[in-house]
Image (cartoon, rainbow, N blue to C red):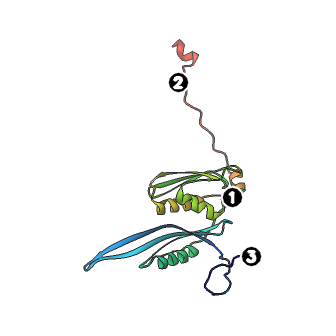
């Protein structure tokens, strides 16, 4: 006997187009003449786990309304991300304000090795194997925006392989050559 989803008789539930993940909910206050006005700020990331992802921030006097606003902003801010074999095509680094993110492609079976906000974004994009490191600020909003910036900087795999290779400069030598010893 299978259980039916609990939806108070509102008919059958249709599957959602995007999965939602609430990154952060903050209580923010504004000081006015009569005291303090409290509102809630919600940061939400949505994605289809197939390379499309969006991020939104919403503010309202109630938590649910703030989340709803953030989801609608995230749907308007959807971006397509280039993926390659359940990972990213190449190493990429990005900075947003003082948050820096380094994303490195990983082999099959590695999993998502990333911190809180970066992990949620990577899961919703559809990345299954990635290594990441965040430097600087640990602010969740800035980390999410830096991760987005890094993912948008990704190029297609064939673009990376055909790009001209940068020559590696020779390492400076400290050893004297035999000609210099004679002088």
From the image, tell me which residue sits under label 1: 156
* Crowding near the residue tagged with mark 1, few <14, some 14–19, many ≥20 C-alpha atoms within 10 Å: some
Q: Residue at x 54, y 30 (%)?
A: 172
Q: Is residue 160 left or right of residue 151?
A: right
Report helix, strand or loop for mark 1: loop
Asked whether disc 2 touches disc 1, contact meaning CB atoms under 8 Å apart, the reply is: no
From the image, tell me which residue sits under label 3: 1
Report helix, strand or loop for mark 2: loop
Give the mark nearer the N terminus: 2 vs 1. Answer: 1
Give the mark nearer the N terminus: 2 vs 3. Answer: 3
Real-space CA distance between mark 3 and mark 1, rounded to the nearest whole angstrom:
47 Å
Q: Residue furthest right?
A: 1
Q: Residue at x 47, y 71 (%)?
A: 42
Q: Is residue 141 left or right of residue 48?
A: left
Real-space CA distance between mark 2 and mark 3, rounded to the nearest whole angstrom:
78 Å
Residue 151 to residue 104: above or below: below
Q: Is residue 83 left or right of residue 174?
A: right
């Amino acid at each position: 006997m299978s259980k039916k989803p609990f939806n108070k008789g509102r008919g059958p539930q249709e599957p959602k187009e995007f999965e939602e993940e609430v990154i952060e909910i903050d209580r923010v206050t504004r000081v006015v003449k009569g005291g303090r006005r409290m509102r809630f700020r919600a940061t939400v990331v949505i994605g289809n786990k197939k390379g499309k992802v969006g991020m939104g921030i919403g503010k309202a006097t109630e938590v649910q309304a703030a989340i709803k606003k953030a989801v609608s902003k995230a749907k308007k801010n959807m971006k397509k991300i280039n993926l390659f074999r359940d990972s990213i095509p190449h190493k990429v680094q990005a900075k947003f304000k003082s948050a820096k993110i380094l994303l490195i492609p990983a082999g099959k079976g590695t999993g998502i090795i990333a911190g809180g906000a970066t992990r949620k974004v990577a899961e919703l994009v559809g990345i299954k194997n990635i290594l990441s490191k965040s430097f600087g600020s640990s602010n969740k909003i800035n980390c999410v925006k830096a991760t987005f910036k890094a993912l948008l900087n990704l190029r297609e795999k064939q673009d990376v392989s055909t790009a001209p290779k940068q020559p590696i400069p020779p390492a400076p030598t400290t050893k004297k050559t035999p000609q210099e010893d004679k002088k």
